[in-house]
Image (spheres, helix red, strand yellow):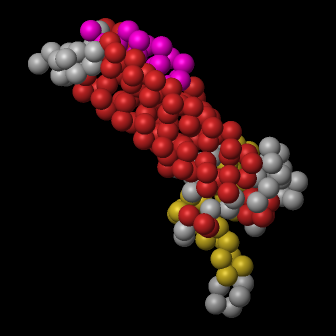
Amino acid sequence: MGSSLTLVGALWAFLSFLTAVASSASYFVPCWLFGSQLGKPVSFGTFRRCTYPARTEERHLVMVEECGRYASFGAIPSLSWQICTVVTGIGCALLLLVALAAILGCCVEELISQMMGRFMGAAQFVGGLLISSGCALYPLGWNSPEIQQTCGNASKQFQLGTCRLGWAYYCMGGGAAAAMLICTWLSCFAGK
């Protein structure tokens, strides 16, 4: 069992795996935005939320302290977050697909040629570009009523009010940047 990758290609495969995992894990966790509502900590992702208000049978407002997806795609608070969900999801899928092929290239001879490595690098660049676009669209949704309930009425597009960005947003952006810049460059030297 041989490898179709050069030494640089093995580094590329490893970094491709790391960027894909970092971006994909960040996509699924609702830790993009942190705030508080009714004295309870609240967090948001693009399609998930932790801690949300609900009415009891007696019509009292209580905070339910659990995480979950929105009931439907249309229930996502803003159009920009809906687009962000789709765009970043496609970008993460591309990064995962390339990472899987790169890891397989470490174990299978003649799987990744120089031309295939460059093609996969181009796919990584597109995946990183899609994720970056999703990260850029995310702040456009900060003016939705749901976010304003959590972040204060001062919250609007590109102004968070009392909320703050979470680690998953930064991890998603960092993974996309590494995929676009480092992995794309390394892919040019990956195949034998």
Q: Please, is residue 165 above or below residue 73 in the view?
A: above
Left or right of 50? Residue 152 is right
Say whether residue 179 is magenta.
yes
Magenta portion: prevailing SS class: helix
Q: Is residue 88 visible?
A: yes
| Residue at image point 23% right, 15% down | 4
Report the span colored magenta. 178-192
Dividing the picture into quadrants, the one containing residue 9 is top left
Count of picture labels:
0
Point out residue 101 in the picture as x, y percentages from the top left corner. Answer: 30, 29
Q: Please, is residue 59 above or below residue 186 in the view?
A: below
- Image quadrant where one finds the N terminus: top left
Left or right of 189? Residue 73 is right
- Image quadrant where one finds the C terminus: top left
Point out residue 32 in the picture as x, y percentages from the top left corner. Answer: 63, 46
Point out residue 99 in the picture as x, y percentages from the top left corner. Answer: 36, 30
Q: Please, is residue 95 above or below residue 28 in the view?
A: above
Dividing the picture into quadrants, the one containing residue 63 is bottom right
| Residue at image point 75% right, 67% down | 38
Q: Is residue 150 visible?
A: no
Which of 32/61 is in front? 32
